Amino acid sequence: MARKFVCTYDAPIVETKAGKLRGFQIDSTYVFRGIKYADAKRWEMPTPVQPWEGVKDALNYGYVCPLVDAPKPSTGELLVPHRYWPEDENCQYLNIWTQSLDRNAKKPVMVWLHGGGFAAGSGIEQVAYDGEALSVYGDLVVVTLNHRLNILGYFDVSSLGEKYWNSANVGNADLVAALQWVNENIENFGGDPNNVTIFGQSGGGMKVSSLCQTPAADNLFQKGIVMSGTTDRDMFSIDLSDVLPKLMEKLNVKTGEELAAVPYRPLIDAYLEVVGRRGAMAFGPKPNGWYLGEALFAGFSERQKKTPLMVGSVIGEFLGFGPGLKNRKTATDEEVREAVGKFYGMEHADEIIAAFKKAYPTSNPLDVLVIDTVFRPAVKRYVTEKAKYTEAPTYSYMFVAEMPIDNGKAPWHCADIPFFFHNAEMVEYCNFPGSDELQEQMASAFVNFARTGNPNNPSLPEWPAVTPEDEACMIFDVKSYVGHNHDNELLELCRKYAPNFNIFENIKVEH
């Protein structure tokens, strides 16, 4: 059945602070793509866009930030379907999906901060980032955006001149500029500038927590959702103080202006030659007063104490990308015990399996072979520390639903995104018995949290906020349930007995 499409010379048109924009309508949704929210010179703070006369088209996605590595086809596309787009340093663009252009509609606003660490990704990178379905389902305004990344967004060249004073954080400064744009313009797209939720996954989750620690963003959002983006390790503490002089020597430049004029590809290639691959992991915001530092290391800002948060992760995360087990569905108790024992030690197998079944009674015990011990312990610490401040609630979740690939496997990093975005039909692996109900539970939690700061809704069991003594955790499965400090014992055993090697190179079960 054909959809309703409208895009004429005079509709739909919206007035912004800088000028008029023309988008298009598809069924009930108004779509505006590639809106320039700021301009910036390399390593300098963003500035507002210059006003224009007439009407600008907002029909196409804008440039994405140049990537460290050139995109290439991957066998992992089935697990995380991607889209790639033309790259340019002038990448400060955002996209809007909304159900109304009435400035009095006052609909909740959700602003998506993409993953890829602080080095890669874009606001349209994953197929599931499309905001139409979530906007329709929740009757809210969805915004996705691009910003400066890697060496363009998080490289400290402040010693080369005052104009570069915040060069280590200009990627996050772009995020603040985007939120400022939303604050000033979103009413004309039907949104409520006083009801903005920022949400993100992986690096996007880290961006959410870092903005909670950025005073310049204090009044630009009201709630936050951190998805698989919490760490209790200082991810950006690698000492790169000697990189700048070595880089300038390698490129044969003497001044900040000369370095800023080097084209991106020679610049990033030279950087990687100087620091090696560790350099790509070092990109991220640096505390300097403008940014206060992550809460678990610098303490919770007054802003973050007052911010309702929803924080969670996926049971498999990065180990979940490995191959499934052919005997996952048919393994006998003894075969499960043997597989677990080969990884954790036979003398610990029974204890590990019992703890896993207690923590995750609806999950396959073989999932203990890929259980995440990076994000999950950090989530527990983060939400428990945040819960000590009673100014705003904090909700914890875990995604455990078995995915229908390789005879069934634990969900991996990013596997939850299509369900939260109400985009399961766009991603093949999201189609399995019970997936519609699971999507209803997860998307409704997002929508209700964005609307009220509380994710509870009739599709879910009662979901209490975390307290310092009780981590009430919504465990999203085909039949979701709430655990209370459910995996404390399990994580302690896993960290105690798991060897420090790649499990897929050592477990000799069939795969």
Image (spheres, rainbow, N blue to C red):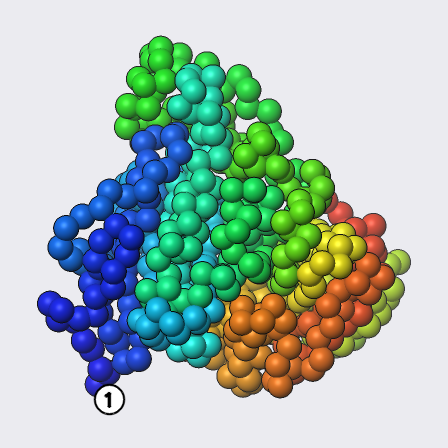
Name the residue nearer the viewer: 38 or 490.
Answer: 38
Res. 343 image quadrant? bottom right
Q: Residue furthest left?
A: 9
- Residue 98 at x, y = what percent? 35, 70
Q: Is residue 380 above or below residue 360?
A: above
Res. 105 image quadrant? bottom left
Q: Residue placed at 58% from the left, 31% from the top?
A: 289
Q: Residue placed at 80% from the left, 70% from the top?
A: 484
Whether residue 348 can be seen here:
yes
Name the residue nearer the viewer: 480 or 338.
Answer: 480
> Which residue has dot 1 on it?
1
Which amino acid does the dot numbered 1 rest on? Met
- Residue 243 at x, y = what percent? 49, 20
Whether residue 490 can be seen here:
no
Q: Residue placed at 33% from the left, 24% from the top?
A: 260
| Left or right: 42, with 60 as reference point | right
Q: Is residue 388 above or below residue 275?
A: below
Q: How busy is the neighbourhood of tag 1: few (under 14 within 10 Å), some, or many (20 plus)?
A: few
